[in-house]
Amino acid sequence: MQEAKSEELKSLEKKEYQNLVNQVKPKPPLLKNFLWAFGVGGFICVIAQMLLNYLLFRGMSETDAGSSVAVVMVFLGALLTGIGVYDKIGEKAGAGSIVPITGFANVIIASAMEFKREGYIFGVGARIFSIAGPTLLFGFTASVLIGLISYWLK
């Protein structure tokens, strides 16, 4: 009987505390955050589209141009992460910086850079594959499954 009252009192105290926290914590500027995310994500995509249009204009096939743009954008994301610029973009843009393909490069490189103190070969070089491995495995597996489903539906 006494334990039930004690648990009920603790539950009420937790609810009261949560209500106080909700009253005091600042409200995030949602519209501003949304506009930054949309603007930065859109800008990254505009850069990729301009590069694609340029490569198509120069006579590259659509498949080759698309592959080239993907490689360039992943490289740029990795480069900007390595020199510390992409993290600053991510602080301001939030999800707008992780949605495009450059976000993939950022996640892989930023995770590997945590091991920089162990050296570039045994730290970053070795860890980048242990981090990228599960991501790539999931991507390859999903691609194969989607390809098989697409093939069987035709």
Image (cartoon, rainbow, N blue to C red):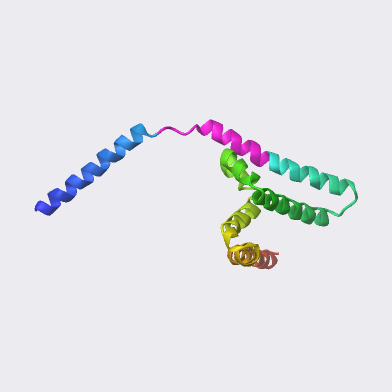
Residue 2 point in image, percent of width and height: 9, 52
Residue 62 visible in the displayed image:
yes
Q: For this rendering, which residue is in front, 7 or 89?
A: 89
How many numbered badges does the structure rendering display? 0
Q: Residue at x 75, y 55 (%)?
A: 71
x then y, percent, for residue 4: 14, 52
Q: Report the quarter where the C terminus lies.
A: bottom right
Decide which of 129, 66 is in the foreground and name it: 129
Q: Residue 130: x percent and y percent?
A: 59, 67
Q: Residue furthest left?
A: 1
Report whether 58 appears left or right of 20. right
Can residue 137 be seen here? The reply is: no
Q: Is residue 148 above or below residue 18?
A: below
Asked whether 40 falls inside the magenta stretch, the response is yes
Asked if residue 16 is among those painted magenta in the image, a careful observer would answer no
Residue at image point 76% right, 52% down:
72
Q: Seen in the image, is 33 located left or right of residue 46?
A: left
Quarter of image, res 24: top left
Q: Is residue 16 depicted above or below 124 in this figure?
A: above
Q: Residue at position x 58%, y 38% from top?
A: 92
Q: Which stretch appears magenta?
A: 26-42
Task: Decide whether the magenta segment is chiefly helix, strand or loop.
Answer: helix
